[in-house]
Every structure is written in structure tokens, then in C-alpha cells.
Amino acid sequence: MLAELRTYTLTADGREPMLRQFEEVSRPIFADIGIVVHGPWLRSLKKGEVFVYVAEFDSPDDRDAKWAAFREHPDWVQAQAREAASGSPGPIAAMETVELSR
């Protein structure tokens, strides 16, 4: 098993949009393509609020294939297009960190 810890440092107004995107868009896509997810968790740190979750994969190849399927999933493509057309003030995360563990 390969575990991927994903940490996003949120922008000042990023909490609600990130939670909404995760629950309404990302989580259903994860289920559809077979990514097991634990979390998310929110933490307030000196550097700001962080959004964290863990994704499980069988192998590095499985991870690569599933993230490719995620990026190409019609629901994700549509959500990204909606976000671009919405005129939102900018990204909901200022920084993203990905750590892998076997």
C-alpha cells in the first residue's frame, strides 16, 4: 500500500470553498475511480489554516493512473471550468504539499 498525505495551506477565504469542493466534487470522484480517502482534517497553525487528507493506492503505478483518471474525470473538468468562469478572486490554497509513504 502507498499512502499519500496531502496538505493544503488555505488562503484567508479558502476554508469554505475547499470544504465544499472536497465534499461535493472531489470525494464523489475519488469513490468513482477507487481512491480510498481518510479525512479531511482542518488545523489552525501559525502559517494559517491547513486542510489535510490521506489517499491510499496499491502502488506507484496505481497512484499515477488514478490521479490521471481524476484530472480527466468529466466532473472535475466541469468543476474547474465553472471555477474559471465564476470570476473568483483566486486560488483557495496558497500552498500544496504531498508526502508519500509505503
Image (tube, helix red, strand yellow):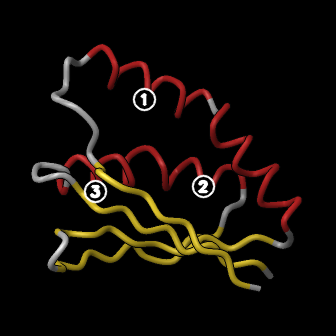
Question: Given the image, on which type of amino acid does mark 3 rest?
Answer: Leu
The quadrant the C terminus occupies is bottom right
Please tell me whether residue 63 is drawn above or below residue 54 in the rendered image. Answer: above
Please tell me whether residue 78 is drawn above or below residue 97 in the rendered image. Answer: above
Q: Residue at label 1?
A: 79
* Helix, strand or loop status at disc 3: helix
* Helix, strand or loop status at disc 2: helix
Write down the quadrant of residue 35 in the picture: bottom right
- Residue 22, percent across and down? 39, 53
Distance between mark 1 and mark 3 Cα atoms? 14 Å
- Residue 32, percent across and down? 66, 50
Q: Residue at label 3?
A: 19
Question: Given the image, on which type of amino acid does mark 2 rest?
Answer: Phe
Please tell me which residue is depicted at 19% across the width and 69% down the height of the picture.
49
Please tell me which residue is depicted at 55% across the width and 66% down the height of the picture.
98
Q: Residue at label 2?
A: 30
Please tell me which residue is depicted at 61% across the width and 57% down the height of the picture.
31
* Helix, strand or loop status at disc 1: helix
Q: Is residue 27 left or right of residue 88?
A: right
Q: Residues within 10 Å of mark 1 (few under 14, many from 20)?
A: some
- Residue 82, percent across and down? 35, 21
Q: Which callout, 2 or 3, points at the residue further toward the start of the chain?
A: 3
Distance between mark 2 and mark 3 Cα atoms? 15 Å
Question: Given the image, on which type of amino acid does mark 1 rest?
Answer: Ala
